[in-house]
Amino acid sequence: MLSPLVNLISYFPRLPLILATMLFSGAVVSANPVIYKAGNPSQGKKLVFVASDHEYRAEETLPALARILAVHHGFDCTVLFGLNGNGEIEAGASNIPGLEALKDADGMIIFTRFLALPVDQMKHIDDYLNRAGPVVGLRTSTHGFNYKDKNDPYYKYHFRYEGKDYNGGFGHQILGQSWVGHYGKNHQQSTRIDIIPEKKNHPILRGVSKVHVHAGGYNAEAQKDWDILTMAQPLMTMKPDGAADKTKPPMASEWTRHYKGKNGKKGRVFTSLYGASEDILNAGYRRLIINGVYWSLGLEKHIKGDSKIDFVGSYKPTTFKNRGEVKGLKPSVYVKLDSPIPGDPSAKVVEKKANKQNIVGFASPSDRKGARFLRIEIPGDNKILTLNEVEIISGGKNVAREGKATQSSVGSGGVPERGIDGNKNPDWGGGGQTHTDGFGSTNPWWEVDLGKEFIVDTVEVWNRKDFEKRLDGFTVQLLDSNRKQIYKSGKTRGAQRVKFSLKFRTVIDYKLYSGKAEPETANTAPVLATVPEGYKDKLPFAFQKGDTVAILGNGLADRMQHDAWMETVLQSALKGQNISFRNMSLSGDRPNKYPRSKGFIPMDKYLQHVKADVIFAMFGFNESFDGPNNAENHKNLLVDFVGKLRSYQPNGKSFPRIVLFSPIAFQNLKDRNLPNGRAHNRNLAAYAKATENAAKEAGVQFIDLFNPTLKLFEQSKDPLTINGAHLNAEGNRLLAEIIAKALLGKDIKANGGLLKIKEAIHKKNWTWHNRYRATDGNDIWGGRSKLRFVN
């Protein structure tokens, strides 16, 4: 007999989501973890999701899956994120507070990459695996750990561990494989996942079909103990119907296996080499993972091929890339079920705000152990470590002064002893600064040996004045006499003074040199406007009085500012309209990349700075070297580019009107030292068409420059380019006429009568160019911009 609740659900299909929302309006409010309680009916099982990878947006994939499993499938779900020193979600952070949730977990879904977690955190993962807990591992978890210190008690989890006791580390021992390599280019080659015919009746494959993922392939070296369910076929495009890459035969992508815990029991494992944020947009793949969770828990009898797998709340994933997470988010933004993924860093979240931040520490005061060594390190390449002073307080006394200091290298006379000499003058000229190799090195460190073990109450680090950012990402470790790690902080940002209080859980105070609390800074992330779905520009494009036009692009646009013909011709026909042009292009730019000096204002903020009403975008030449097979990817990139430009709302009042220009053709100069252009023009034609298709899809103006210039080059007896690709003065003049005709609908001659206008624009461009792209940007706004010279 059906229960009254089941009868109600049969009459009201949406009732489960409504009830779930009523029964638990979201999650338990906490910095980390975020907890989604099970909807009805409950499975009575607890799942823990561990999210910290650098590239594939685990911090978006896992909370989305957790919501589905909680609301639609009745699991209690706990989501843990990698956090930085400010308690914000950081891609790949080796600091995941809350892992003690694994103590009573029924299943672990892990999506990590190259982590080296502190001992007190990794202990919980180790304990869970020792009891053979079920594991679902996604994508980079095959190389989920990367401990550098061979003395670390959990070094065996390193993805390249060679010891016979745990060869291959976590990836090989638990998931069945460590890191092998890529098997398809991200953002250029998507992947079709096909079910092995003989496995079609496997419980995990119930209801699974049409699986297509965005992520490029991973290599797989199949092992005897794998039960392979699916094969991955790299495609030549990002579309599901793309042609298969004939150079890459199908490769295993999902499998099951078992591993043995220290208790002698066997644990179930489901491994997928995919799982990027955009991958789970595909319903077939999403169901594959949901079913894999059920199987890992031994609940295969409960797997239904038509179970609900809809997203809970808005899910619009970020395009995955290394360190591409949305910055400034704290886990609390995901507390409510209807909160969007990814979250909005500008959204107000009710939580206690202070200069103090819980990170990691000892479980209780009685757990505190004596430390003999303190080590400060900055992870990464080409880093310089400078310190002013380090105090280690034990029982009210600074025990660091009696210690012996060493460091990884010495630069500029900054010997390690200066870090404990009592000289707290923050200026370099005060003679109290340490300094590692002045050219930068990998993972530079400073360490003090206290001579014997002390119970450490606080550690305070004084930084070098005007170089506070240089310390960003530093970690503090405490080691006992056997150099066993007893404490490690998360990555911590640099400040004038940073104090770690260690009596219970770590509390970090950020202070000024005066000892006063560091004032809180405003969130400088741009506020993004919501673009209505299906929004399109009013076409055809037309200039409006007072427009500011920002020009973006690569070589074609970049060289225009030195010639000035395009703006000259347009301005001659726009008298009295007060139109301004700001060329913000650079030859190396792409729609999603703007290489600039460190410290340069990001493009979104610069567009807001100039208050652009109109944006001319001239991309396609650089991109064409990726070949015609990737033209579709360029189209998708441009569509995404248009969406982002609109969300910036640069003028602060309306969406910018956008014009996408195709690349120009390549001219055959009949010079044996230069290409004849046939292959180039095949590529450029494909990218011109991709630009046109992007404009249609995004609803913006398209200007074809390829076909008119191809015709122009064929008819001209004289060179119009300097090398086939870049226009000379005459080529720029004729192209200006083509652009004016396309934009204004009438012929305008670029002749001698416009030379005075051209001269004025050329002077304006020179002034703008030297401001926007100063000769040595690194001296002006980059790494050397804050140098102070002393006697």
Image: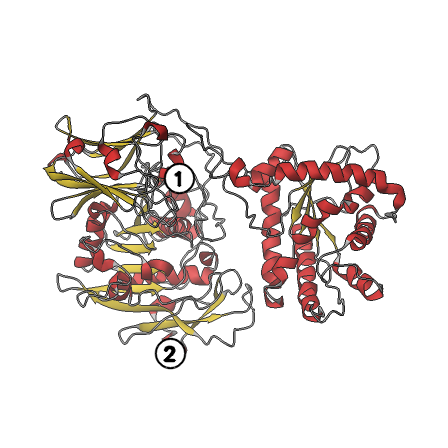
The quadrant in which residue 514 appears is: top left
Q: Identify the residue position indicated by label 2 in the image.
A: 198
Residue placed farthest to the front in the image? Answer: 791
Which badge, 1 or 2, comes first in the chain's sequence? 2
Q: Is residue 99 above or below residue 160?
A: above
The quadrant in which residue 222 appears is: bottom left
Looking at the picture, how far across and down is residue 714, in whole percent?
81, 66
Residue placed farthest to the right in the image? Answer: 753
Q: Please, what is the three-letter code of the amino acid marked with disc 2?
A: Glu
Q: Which mark is residue 112?
A: none
SS of the residue at dot 1?
loop
Q: Dot 1: few (<14), some (14–19), or many (≥20) neighbours within 10 Å?
A: many
Is residue 210 visible in the rendered image? The answer is no
357 lies left or right of 738: left
785 lies left or right of 255: right
Looking at the picture, how far across and down is residue 535, in whole percent?
65, 45
Q: Dot 2: few (<14), some (14–19), or many (≥20) neighbours within 10 Å?
A: few
SS of the residue at dot 2?
helix
Q: Is residue 663 above or below residue 226?
A: above
Q: Identify the residue position indicated by label 1 in the image.
A: 336
Is residue 304 visible in the rendered image? The answer is yes
